């Protein structure tokens, strides 16, 4: 599925619920759902906070796919300013907005709760965060 | 000994109207919020209790931060108890809010206590190292007891000098 919405913080909750609903046919555990929702929340919040210059409107896209191997693939992307140094951005506690009480833990949380995380970004060319979670086998 | 009175009175959010009801009574002093998060504030002596109800993410953390800071200032609170009993979701934005409040409260010489977390939120807070700067206590009542005894210990120390 593909969702597109404005970079408004009100939409963060919607994105979480939409992805959780989309993954529900796989019958995830409560824990797996919470982990997925949290990872989505981090990625979408990053886009809302950082992708577009202050006050400017921009779109955030969330795509999701599930398959028979119980794998959930989520892609959060935007056409925003891009990340200058992806390595640095992924460092725990690093944030480009320290004055706003940001914990800098977004990518760390995504990495902990998902099985794979890939970040593609170039200054001026937008950002694409791909996350994959393999749900536990249901016997 | 401090206790939380079940017959709490709602008081207007006007610092001029607020008057201490004496040691041992907690009152609901304000309620704020929007669609995703409501905060109910209770005050007991110089302890502010922030009862959060809803989701704590980037969107709602702005309101939570602002309202707690406003209330601490208006009512001259020294200590802060975060009651997560009704928090249904939290991500790393919640951690930012807690850290920010910790910085402000410790500047006032007070302490921060976190209570009411479910297993999952507990795990995140632990992961983020929040329990190295804030105590984790099971219930609001126990949190109040802990803060009161901390203060009494500190006062006792001063008297001995």
Image: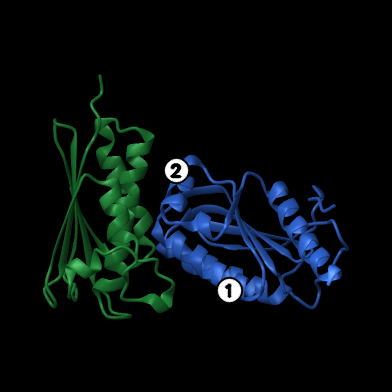
Chain colours: A green, B blue
**Residue B139, image x and y in percent?**
66, 45
Label 2, secondary structure: give it: helix
User: In this orientation, which residue lies closer to the viewer: A11 or A113?
Assistant: A113
- On the image, which quarter does residue A33 sit in? top left
Local crowd size for mark 2, using a 10 Å CA cut-off: few (<14), some (14–19), many (≥20): some
Q: Is residue B60 visible?
A: yes
Above or below B10: residue A27: above
Q: Does residue B82 appear left or right of residue B120 in this picture?
A: right
Residue underneath mark 1? B104
**Disc 2 and disc 1: Cα gap in Å?**
26 Å
Which element carries disc 1, helix, strand or loop? helix
Could you tell me residue B109's position as x and y percent? Answer: 67, 72
Q: Residues within 10 Å of mark 1 (few under 14, many from 20)?
A: some
**Residue under disc 2 on the same chain as residue under disc 1:** yes
Residue A76 in the image: state x and y as whole percent: 21, 58
Residue under the point 70% across and 69% down: B78
Residue B19 shows in this picture = no
Please, which chain is the residue tagged with disc 1 on?
Answer: B
Give the image quarter of residue B39: bottom right
Asked if residue B88 is positioned above or below residue B47 in the image, the reply reads above
Q: Nearer the viewer, residue B9 or B153?
A: B153
Q: Quadrant of the C terminus of chain A?
A: top left
Q: Is B159 situated left or right of B140 in this image? A: right
* Chain bearing mark 2: B
Residue located beneath label 2 in the image:
B120
Q: How many marks?
A: 2
- Sequence-wise first label, 2 or 1: 1
């Amino acid at each position: 599925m593909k969702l597109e919405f404005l970079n408004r913080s009100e939409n963060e909750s919607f994105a979480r619920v939409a992805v959780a609903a989309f993954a529900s046919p796989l019958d995830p555990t409560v824990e797996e759902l919470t982990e997925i929702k949290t990872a989505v929340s981090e990625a979408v919040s990053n886009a809302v906070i950082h992708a577009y210059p202050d006050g400017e409107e921009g779109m955030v896209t969330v795509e999701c796919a599930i398959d028979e191997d119980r794998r959930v693939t989520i892609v959060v992307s935007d056409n925003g300013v891009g990340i200058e140094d992806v390595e640095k951005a992924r460092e725990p506690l690093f944030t480009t907005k320290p004055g706003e009480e940001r914990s800098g833990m977004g990518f760390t949380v995504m990495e902990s709760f998902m099985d794979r995380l890939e970040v593609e970004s170039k200054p001026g060319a937008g950002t694409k965060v791909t996350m994959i979670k393999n749900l536990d086998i249901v016997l | 000994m401090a206790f939380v009175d079940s017959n709490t009175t709602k008081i207007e959010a006007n610092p001029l109207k607020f008057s201490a009801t004496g040691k041992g009574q907690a009152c609901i002093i304000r309620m704020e919020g929007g669609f995703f998060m409501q905060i109910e504030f209770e005050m007991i002596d110089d302890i502010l209790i922030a009862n959060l109800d809803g989701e704590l993410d980037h969107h709602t953390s702005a309101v939570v931060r602002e309202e707690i800071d406003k209330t601490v200032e208006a009512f001259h609170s020294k200590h802060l108890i975060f009651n997560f009993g009704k928090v249904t979701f939290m991500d790393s934005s919640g951690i930012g809010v807690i850290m920010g409040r910790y910085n402000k409260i410790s500047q006032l010489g007070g302490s921060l206590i976190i209570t009411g977390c479910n297993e999952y939120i507990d795990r995140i807070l632990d992961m983020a190292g929040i329990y190295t700067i804030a105590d984790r206590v099971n219930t609001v009542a126990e949190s109040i007891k802990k803060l009161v005894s901390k203060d009494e210990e500190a006062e006792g120390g001063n008297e001995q000098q």
